[in-house]
Amino acid sequence: MESKIEVLSTIKLDYQSDLYKIVDALNRTLKHKDVMFGLALDSEDNSKAVFTIYRT
């Protein structure tokens, strides 16, 4: 069985230490809707975060 993950949207924003809590709440709440949310530090600027929405 092959799983395809599609990027729906990506946005760069100022990093805040509690952003992961929003991503966690979204993932827990909307997992049954076949969407997933990701958060990473920008590799070029550690003061920025990259928030991504995926379709699973």
Image: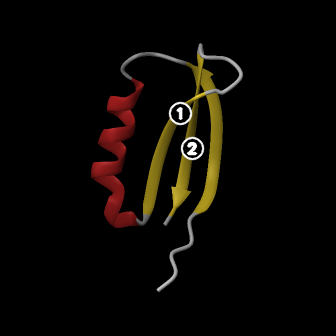
Residue drawn at x 63%, y 48% as measured from the top left: 9
* Marker disc for residue 7: none
The residue carrying mark 2 is 52
> Label 2 crowding class (10 Å Cα cut-off): few <14, some 14-19, many 20+?
some
For the residue pair 38 and 1, the one nearer the viewer reads as 1
Q: Nearer the viewer, mark 2 or mark 1?
A: 1
Residue drawn at x 62%, y 56% as measured from the top left: 7
Residue type, mark 2 in image: Thr
Residue drawn at x 54%, y 56% as measured from the top left: 54
Mark pair 2, 1: CA separation:
9 Å
| Position of 3 relative to 45 (above/below) | below
Indicate the position of residue 38 as horizontal and vertical percent values. 48, 43
The residue carrying mark 1 is 40
Indicate the position of residue 11 as horizontal and vertical percent values. 64, 35
Is mark 2 in CB contact (under 8 Å) with mark 1? Answer: yes
Indicate the position of residue 44 as horizontal and vertical percent values. 71, 22
Figure quadrant of residue 24? top left
> Label 1 crowding class (10 Å Cα cut-off): few <14, some 14-19, many 20+?
some
For the residue pair 42 and 32, the one nearer the viewer reads as 42
Element at label 1: strand
Q: Earlier in the sequence, mark 2 or mark 1?
A: 1
| Position of 8 relative to 52 (above/below) | below
Residue type, mark 1 in image: Ala
* Residue furthest right as drawn: 44
Element at label 2: strand
| Position of 56 relative to 28 (above/below) | below
